[in-house]
Image: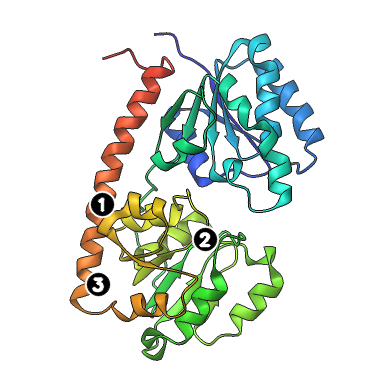
């Protein structure tokens, strides 16, 4: 079978999911970092595709204009177009998101294939869009634990996005029995994106902000965490923090959304960020045998989802002509 050239195109920044997917498919990664109104990114994307002439293009969406740009050259260059749809493309939190993405939603019907992250996203797709559910690729698990951390802590992986209830988490932690016992709360991610919020959170005793750290440092912290908190107020989102916690067999506490309950089942304790005391109650149960029980559930569910991902990935490879039909 002739080798096909696959390119993954992203605007602004590359997500962990897209990076992992590109690695699984042997795809070249091309990131155009320019932001709105994306005029320069659009021009450079068209120039790159005309010059490189790939066989298959994966577009990392949430940006609607990227989908439009990739469709413009699809027939001229002759590639298959796979739209990897992130939740932000279909669920709009503000007018800016709506303007940048909502007008392009129906264009998914013109893509050769649309990838969605979980089954519940199907109802958001336009009729006629050919789609496949493909979970996030399992994260890497380093052999070494990384730099030894000499205290117990809860880990909150964060993108510092509007849908993350970080203030709620810190308030609940501050009044929890775990904080009284000296367990710290570590929030990762580039907190410089929201300096005022960062200052408020960092002023709470026991709360630590890592800022931007390397993958090696991040996964080392994941490996040593007492438990992981995966939080969002947005429906239809499956959080990378949840995937990572399960891969590492960590007790998991997650927002109570339909999507997360569907995906995680009994592998997590749940909290409602709209209810005072909800997270504090979940944190209070993390002790002794319960920790071991939750770790085992997390690991078991992670293995189940990993097997399902491998099945989905094999189906995708067959659909793209990277594997012969079985």
Is residue 66 visible to us here? yes
Place of residue 196 in the rendered image (x, y in percent of width and height, measured from the top left): 70, 74
C-alpha gap between disc 2 and disc 1: 23 Å
Place of residue 271 in the rendered image (x, y in percent of width and height, measured from the top left): 40, 69
C-alpha gap between disc 1 and disc 3: 16 Å
Instruction: Kindly indicate whether the residue at mark 3 contacts the one at mark 1 (C-beta within 8 angstroms).
Output: no
Q: Secondary structure at mark 2?
A: loop
Q: Secondary structure at mark 3?
A: helix
Find residue 263 and name its label: none
Badge 1 is on which residue? 301
Q: Nearer the viewer, residue 98 or 158?
A: 98
Q: Quadrant of the C terminus?
A: top left
Is residue 143 visible to us here? no
Neighbourhood count class around disc 1 (C-alpha, 10 Å): few under 14, some 14–19, many 20 upward? many
Badge 3 is on which residue? 291
C-alpha gap between disc 2 and disc 3: 25 Å
Badge 2 is on which residue? 233
Q: Which is closer to the viewer, label 2 or label 1?
A: 2
Q: Which is closer to the viewer, label 2 or label 3?
A: 2
Q: Residue at x 36, y 18 (%)?
A: 318
Q: Earlier in the sequence, mark 2 or mark 3?
A: 2
């Amino acid at each position: 079978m002739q080798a096909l050239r696959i390119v993954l195109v992203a605007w602004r920044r590359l997500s962990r999911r897209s990076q992992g997917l590109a690695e699984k498919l042997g795809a070249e990664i091309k990131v155009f970092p320019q932001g709105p109104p994306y005029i320069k990114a659009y021009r450079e994307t068209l120039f790159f595709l005309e010059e490189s002439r790939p066989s298959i293009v994966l577009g990392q969406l949430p940006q609607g204009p990227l989908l439009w740009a990739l469709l413009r050259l699809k027939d001229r260059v002759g590639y298959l177009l796979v739209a990897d749809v992130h939740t932000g493309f279909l669920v709009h939190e503000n007018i800016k998101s709506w303007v940048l993405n909502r007008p392009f939603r129906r264009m998914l019907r013109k893509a050769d294939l649309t990838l969605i992250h979980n089954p519940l996203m199907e109802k958001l797709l336009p009729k006629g869009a050919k789609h496949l559910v493909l979970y996030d690729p399992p994260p890497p698990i380093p052999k070494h634990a990384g730099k030894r951390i000499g205290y117990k802590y809860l880990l909150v992986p964060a993108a510092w996005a509007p849908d993350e209830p970080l203030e709620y988490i810190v308030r609940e932690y501050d009044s929890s029995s775990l904080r009284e016992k000296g367990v710290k709360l570590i929030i990762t991610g580039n907190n410089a994106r929201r300096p005022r919020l960062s200052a408020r959170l960092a002023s709470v005793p026991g709360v630590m902000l890592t800022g931007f750290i390397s993958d090696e440092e991040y996964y080392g912290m994941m490996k040593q965490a007492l438990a992981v908190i995966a939080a969002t107020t947005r429906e239809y989102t499956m959080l990378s923090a949840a995937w990572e916690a399960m891969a590492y067999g960590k007790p998991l506490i997650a927002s109570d959304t339909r999507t997360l309950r569907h995906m995680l089942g009994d592998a997590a304790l749940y909290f409602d960020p709209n209810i005072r005391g909800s997270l504090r109650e979940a944190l209070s149960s993390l002790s002794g045998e319960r920790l071991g029980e939750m770790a085992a559930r997390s690991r078991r569910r992670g293995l189940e989802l990993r097997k399902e991902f491998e099945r989905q990935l094999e189906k995708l490879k067959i659909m793209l002509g990277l594997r012969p039909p079985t």
